[in-house]
Structures are given as C-alpha cells and as structure tokens.
Image (tube, coloured by chain):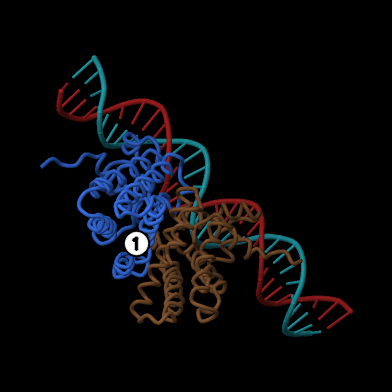
Chain colours: A blue, B brown, C red, D cyan
Amino acid sequence: MTEPSTCDLILASAERRARTGGYHGFSFREIADEIGVKSASIHYHFPAKEDLGAVLARRYADRFLERLGPPDAATPDERIARYKATFRAAVAEDGRMCLCGMFGAEITALPARVAEETRDFFARNLLWLAAVEARRGHGEDAAQVRAATILAALEGAIILSRTMGDLAFFDRVADNLG
Amino acid sequence: MTEPSTCDLILASAERRARTGGYHGFSFREIADEIGVKSASIHYHFPAKEDLGAVLARRYADRFLERLGPPDAATPDERIARYKATFRAAVAEDGRMCLCGMFGAEITALPARVAEETRDFFARNLLWLAAVEARRGHGEDAAQVRAATILAALEGAIILSRTMGDLAFFDRVADNLG
DNA sequence: AATTTCCTATCTATCAGTAGATAGACTCAT
DNA sequence: ATGAGTCTATCTACTGATAGATAGGAAATT
C-alpha cells in the first residue's frame, strides 16, 4: 500500500471543495490545513490557483471520459445508460456537483486556462454523446441535438436534485430522457 | 424620472455579480465601488452577506414567476414556450446565469437562508410546470416528471450555452424538449 | 413658529481574519 | 552535492463586519 502523494492529496481535497463551493469557494489554506501541510507547499506543486484549477478540470474530464469507455461499444441504449450512471455517481456517491458543471456555471468568472479546460470537458462529452446517438440512424443534426439535450438535462438534474435534497429528482429526469 | 434608490442599486449590482461568479464571487466592496458608496453603507441596508443573498434569491424568484404569469392561461404549449423564453432571456439579454441555477450549484456551500430561498425558487418552478403539464391530461406523476425534466434541461442548457459561448446550444435543447 | 428630538442614510476609521503569493532556509534521499 | 519537497516567515490586498460621527429631514414638543 503506497500512501498517496501530496500532489494527489491536494487534488483530491481541491476537487471536493471546488465541487461544493466552486472556483471561488476554496482556498490554498483550507486545502493545506486539511491534508496537513503549509499553503506554501501547495504553491510548490501548483504555482498559481489557475494552475490548480486547470489541472483539476483536465483531470476530472479525463477520468470522466475514461469511465464512459468508447462510444461504439455495446448498444446505444447501453451506452446512454452508462452515461447517465456516470453522472448519477457524481451526486450519489460523492454527494457533490459535477466539477465542470460547477465551473461551467462560473465560466465568465474563471481564469482563462480553467475556462478552456472546462470547455474541453463539454466538447468531449458532446462528441461522445453525438457518436452514440449517430448509431441510432438519425441524421448528424439530430444526433447533436440529442447530445446537447442529454448533457444539459443531466447537469441540470444534478443541480435540481442537490438543491431539493432528493436524488429522486435526478432519476426522474434521467429516466425521462428515453 | 426618479433615480433608483441605493438599495436598488445594491441589489442590481449584486445580482449581476452573483450571476457571474456565484455567492462567493462578489464582495461588498466591489458593489460599493461600482455604485459609488462605501461598503459600510451596504451593511446598513443588508446587515450581513447572508441577508443580501437571501433577498437576492427571493427577489429573483418573485420576478421570474411574475414574468411567467399564471400556469392556467392560454394553452399548455404557449405556457411552456413562455417558460423557455423566460429562461432564454436570462442568457440572451443579460448574458448571465440564472441566479438560482448558480446558487443551486453551490447549495451546500450557502448560508441557510440563502439556500432556503434557492430551494423555494425550484419548488415554485416545479409547481408551475407541473400545473401546466397536468392540463395535458397526463397523470400527476407524469406531470411531475415532465416538470423536473424541463427545469433541469433549461438550467443545464444555460450552463452549456454559456460555456460553449454559443446561444445555439440553448435553442437546440429548448426546441428538443417538445 | 420655533425648537428639540428622532430617524435615515451615509460617512470615516478600524478590526481580525483570510486571500494568493513569494523568498529563503531546512531536510532528506539519491 | 544535488535536487525535490516542505518549512518558516512574510507580503500586499482584500474579506465581512463594527463603532462612532455626521448631515439632513421628518416628527413631536414647546
């Protein structure tokens, strides 16, 4: 059992906090106190907050896409079910927002590189979803419309269910998406 | 022409800032500087930030619901079209997030009274939408599922279109909701 | 009518706490 | 010895918040 590196601890703590209070809702000091180092040590790994935020968003997107697997596996229905389940886990297991949904809401108040990574998350998700939907035989336009609707509905569903404090709201939306 | 009161100026500035950077993304001093008073004067009108946040959310919800009008007017299709248009205006005219969508994303990091008002916004929206959908002759359960889906999809659509910097994403989602 | 009292809204000045960030020294394994 | 990682110590700027003073007008009292 190898203990996690300070870098990993920083990222884990920062992600948890960013998914709760957003980019402006966490600080180097809070993270430092939580993992038992000094805030100066965090600046060693991430010179500026923007660096930490950008790595956070990139890492989140990579992990998310990896969990989805390829869009052309199994059946479209199974792929979409897996997509919904991946989103559901964000709120069900972690009890938190989707990091990039949070960053997306704050997009015009984010440092450039954080905003860029956030956009990438959405773009990659739209590509994945459109690839799945295209297999259903609909046209390219219809696939993109479906992709945007699924992504938007699930991001909104996390906000809705967390705000109302009831995961049933997420399931209602997810099940209704067909 | 009566000039707006300081109180109104505070609320307008705070709302604009909260809809950009969230609850933790605006400060008394920024608002004070913008409208040309001292931050202490804002504390006179709103003793604590929580007070300002709560009034902000309540006022936003009241205004939003007022713009919708009654759920039993015209036809269900017209009502839903109006609902979409009201959401669209948030991003199209103001270029900003739905205030309560933003607060909803941050819900677990908000002071109690701000969170409460945010929940109220969502609850009132769900009631309004379910009342409209119930007129279509579907059951009560189906109406609530439809209500949750429309609300979630539109909140998500604002995030998506703002993040991607293209209002077309909002329209794709809104049009696809039937 | 004149005077006093009170209220509203703002100001100045200040507080303790925290923000992100930096410089330089220490530790320890290679 | 070198370099990675962490520390202490510190900086400037800003956070929400409070105390006390002040100006102007409304209301009450004389």
Screen quadrant of the N terminus of chain A? top left
Question: Element under label 1?
Answer: helix
- Residue B91 image position (x, y, % from top left): 53, 57
* Viewer can see residue B173: yes
Screen quadrant of the C terminus of chain A? bottom left
Q: How crowded is mark 1: few (under 14 residues within 10 Å), some or many (20 or more)?
A: many
Kindly identify the residue that appears in the image at 65 percent across and 63 percent down.
B6
Q: In this view, does A23 lie above or below B14?
A: above
* Viewer can see residue A32: no
- Residue A85 placement, left or right of B110: left
Looking at the rendered structure, the number of numbered marks drawn on it comes to 1
- Residue B161 placement, left or right of A77: right
- Residue D24 placement, left or right of C24: right
- Residue B133 placement, left or right of B7: left
- Residue A139 image position (x, y, % from top left): 38, 52
Residue nearest the observer in this picture, A150 or B38: A150
Q: In this view, does B170 lie above or below B56?
A: above
- Residue A2 image position (x, y, % from top left): 13, 40
Disc 1 target residue: A158
**Quarter of the view holding residue A101:** bottom left
As shown in the figure, which amino acid type bears the numbered disc 1? Answer: Ile
The subunit carrying tag 1 is: A
Residue nearest the observer in this picture, A86 or D10: A86
**Quarter of the view holding residue B1:** bottom right
Kindly identify the residue that appears in the image at 46 percent across and 62 percent down.
B174
- Residue A20 image position (x, y, % from top left): 35, 56
Residue nearest the observer in this picture, B116 or C23: B116
Kindly identify the residue that appears in the image at 62 percent across and 55 percent down.
B38
Q: Is residue B160 above or below residue B174?
A: above
Q: In this view, does B104 lie above or below A48?
A: below
